[in-house]
Amino acid sequence: QDDCSEFRSQFEAGGRLSCTRENAPVRDASGRQHINKCLMCAEKFKKEAQRGGGTLQRNRLPGSERTKQ
């Protein structure tokens, strides 16, 4: 189950997720604590994008489309 599914649609292709700074501590699967769930998911999405998978890949244009713009 994707515990960040509610934030995936808000994730921008540029690798950003806009989050508030409300204090609602949450721990990720590794046990690391984050200020709130949105910030936890933002970090998760950033790592996925850096690995070249997950959300960022789905939002990217194919190489041929990028050159047309």
Image (spheres, rainbow, N blue to C red):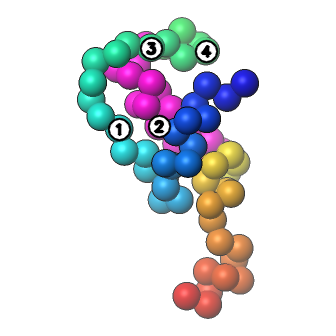
Q: Which residues are magenta?
A: 33-51
Of labels 2 and 4, earlier in sequence is: 4
Q: Is residue 22 left or right of residue 18?
A: left
Q: Earlier in the sequence, mark 3 or mark 1?
A: 1
Q: How far, Cα to Cα, is label 2 from label 1?
A: 8 Å
Camera-near label (2 vs 1) is: 1
Q: Residue 17 colored magenta?
A: no
Magenta stretch mostly in which secondary structure?
A: helix
Within-10-Å neighbours for mark 3: few <14, some 14–19, many 20+: some
Image position of 63 (left or right of 35): right
Q: Is residue 53 visible?
A: yes
Q: Nearer the viewer, mark 1 or mark 4?
A: 1
Residue receiving disc 4: 29
Q: Can you identify the residue that label 1 sits on?
A: 19
Percent of width and height locating residue 26:
44, 14
From the image, tell me which residue sits under label 3.
26
> Which is more N-terminal, label 4 or label 1?
1
Q: Residue at x 61, y 35 (%)?
A: 5
Query: Residue 52 location in percent, x, y?
Result: 67, 51
Q: Residue at x 68, y 57 (%)?
A: 58
Where, quadrant-wise, is the N terminus in this rendering?
A: top right
Which secondary structure, mark 1? loop
Quadrant in the rendering for residue 31: top right
Badge 2 or badge 3: first in the primary sequence: 3
Distance between mark 3 and mark 1 Cα atoms:
14 Å
Residue found at x 52% / y 39%: 7
Amino acid type, label 4 = Ala
**What is the spatial separation of the Cα atoms under label 1 and label 4, in whole angstroms?**
20 Å
Q: Which residue is mark 2?
A: 42
Q: Is residue 17 left or right of residue 44?
A: left
